[in-house]
Amino acid sequence: MSEGRTMTPVGMDQHRSGQLSPRELEILLLVAHGMSDSEVSVALSISPRTVGAHLTNIREKLCARNRTHLVERALRAGLLAIRTHASPPQSGDIDRTFDLTDAAGNVGEIR
C-alpha cells in the first residue's frame, strides 16, 4: 500500500469521521477478516499496543462502539465491500470475504 492516499467514509460527517490513513485501512481490513490484535500485529510487524491505538482511532473516526460495529459502519460507509465470489477460507488461510473500496465504490488496493 502506498503512502499519501487516504479515504473518507461515504455519507458520514467529514468532521466526525476524519480520514482513515493507509495503515488504518490495512488494520480495518484485517479486523474485518476476523484477525485479533495479536494476529494483526504479527501480520504488519507492529506491536499489539500500536494495533490497539489504531483501532481506537478508527472506532472514533467511524463512531463505532466495538469491532463488530466497526465493520458494520465501514460497510455502510462504503469503505469495505463484501466479495460475492469469495470461497470459504481453508484452515490457516486468511478470510478474504472483504475488500477495501474508495469513495466512488471502486474495489481495489489503496494507492
Image (cartoon, rainbow, N blue to C red):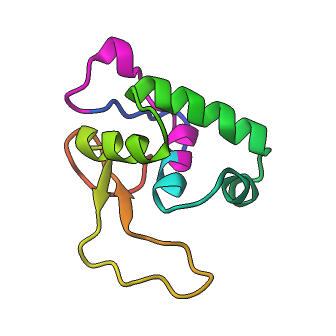
Report the span colored magenta. 10-27
Q: Is residue 95 above or below residue 35?
A: below
| Residue 17 included in the magenta stretch of the image | yes
Q: Is residue 8 above or below residue 67?
A: above
Q: Residue at x 39, y 47 (%)?
A: 71
Is 41 positioned to the left or the right of 17 in the image? right
Is 68 positioned to the left or the right of 12 in the image? right
Q: Is residue 31 visible?
A: yes
Q: Can you name the residue that lies furthest to the top here?
A: 15
Q: Residue at x 39, y 29 (%)?
A: 62
Q: Nearer the viewer, residue 94 or 1?
A: 94
Q: Is residue 102 above or below residue 85?
A: above
Q: Nearer the viewer, residue 104 or 34?
A: 34
| Residue 64 included in the magenta stretch of the image | no
Q: Position of residue 89 (x, y in %)?
A: 47, 82
Q: Position of residue 6 (x, y in %)?
A: 43, 33
Q: Nearer the viewer, residue 24 or 61?
A: 61
Q: Position of residue 92 (x, y in %)?
A: 62, 82
Q: Residue at x 26, y 38 (%)?
A: 77
